[in-house]
Amino acid sequence: MDLSRRKLITAGIAGASGLAAAARIADRYGLIPPDGAGIWGPGETLTYAAQRVLTGDSMAREFPRELISKPPHANGRPPKDDVFVKHQTAGFADWRLAVDGLVARPMEFSVAEIKSFPSRSQITHLACEEGWSFIAEWTGVPLSHILERVGIAATARYVVYRSIQERWWDSVDMADALHPQTIITWGMNGGDLPVGHGGPLRVRVPRQLGYKSVKFVTRLTVVDSVKAFGKGMGSFAAERGYAWYNGI
Ligand SMILES: Nc1nc2c(c(=O)[nH]1)N[C@H]1C(S)=C(S)[C@@H](COP(=O)(O)O)O[C@H]1N2
Ligand SMILES: [Mo]
């Protein structure tokens, strides 16, 4: 959907009927974000519910190859702690992505196994909430493929993902978890995913702001509630005042 139109409709809902309408939509579609109970709650519920209703299964924009940012933006410094450096020195041979929670078959995958799964490459925009952004080609296995392998329960509502950087964790609802553009990324611009950008494995959620794309991911947990994690708001970012849901 065209962004200006989406903005207009969202603004229309907000302006015309306000929070009462948001509450009705949220109620009807079961769209209460995990951070919806806090002081930002009604506003977050409005954004989340309005976007979910208006954009449905729409795709994040994909760009032609000429628009890949050059030189590639280098934001992050890789973790400097011993555990990470040891993994890096070993070429991430012992890195594992564990998948647990409401699944029929909890599993652990090596990077090589993840790379052997059907992959998808997409040229998308990564936008930081602080204003900068860049376009890169990201290659990885759709999260939906991994979830299919482990067999998710019918009660699954969120996928929580965690990083070797313990304070970085986040979650998405099943609409985003099963969305074809949500991938466990292992490649960037034709090569391996650089450690500065989250290698060896990173979640990419191109329909949301950059901070949902957690780097150095080590564990996926399928849950029916995010209450047990941190302060129960669904993400590290939400605990610091950012929205759990930040669709773009
Ligand atoms: N593990 C981890 N994931 C992370 C971050 C981080 O510091 N550590 N930063 C987040 C933020 S705020 C943004 S905008 C993007 C930046 O992605 P980049 O390093 O590829 O530019 O990664 C997100 N994921
Ligand atoms: Mo960011």
Image (cartoon, helix red, strand yellow):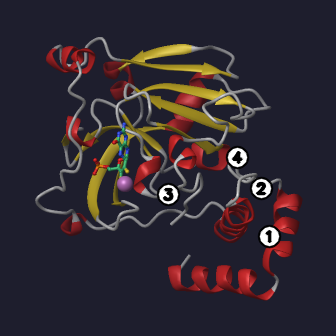
Mark 3 Cα shell of 10 Å, populated few (<14), some (14-19), many (≥20): many
Say which residue label 2 marks: 31
Q: Is mark 2 within 8 Å of ligand 1?
A: no
Left or right of 234? Residue 123 is left
Task: Name the amino acid, label 2.
Answer: Leu
Task: Name the amino acid, label 3.
Answer: Gln
Q: Earlier in the sequence, mark 3 or mark 2?
A: 2
Say which residue label 1 marks: 22
Q: Earlier in the sequence, mark 4 or mark 1?
A: 1
Q: Which mark is residue 134?
A: none
Left or right of 37? Residue 220 is left
**Quadrant where the N terminus is found in the figure:** bottom right
Q: Quadrant of residue 36?
A: bottom right
Q: Secondary structure at mark 2?
A: loop
Q: Earlier in the sequence, mark 4 or mark 3?
A: 4
Task: Name the amino acid, label 4.
Answer: Pro
Nearer to me, 159 or 236 = 236
Say which residue label 4 marks: 34
Q: CA distance from mark 3 to mark 1?
A: 20 Å
Nearer to me, 9 or 138 = 9
Say which residue label 3 marks: 208
From the top left corner, tell me how far across and down residue 134 is, in percent.
27, 62
Q: CA distance from mark 4 to mark 3?
A: 16 Å
Q: Residue at x 47, y 14 (%)?
A: 108
Judged from the image, the quadrant occupied by ligand 2 is bottom left
Q: Secondary structure at mark 3?
A: loop
Mark 4 Cα shell of 10 Å, populated few (<14), some (14-19), many (≥20): many
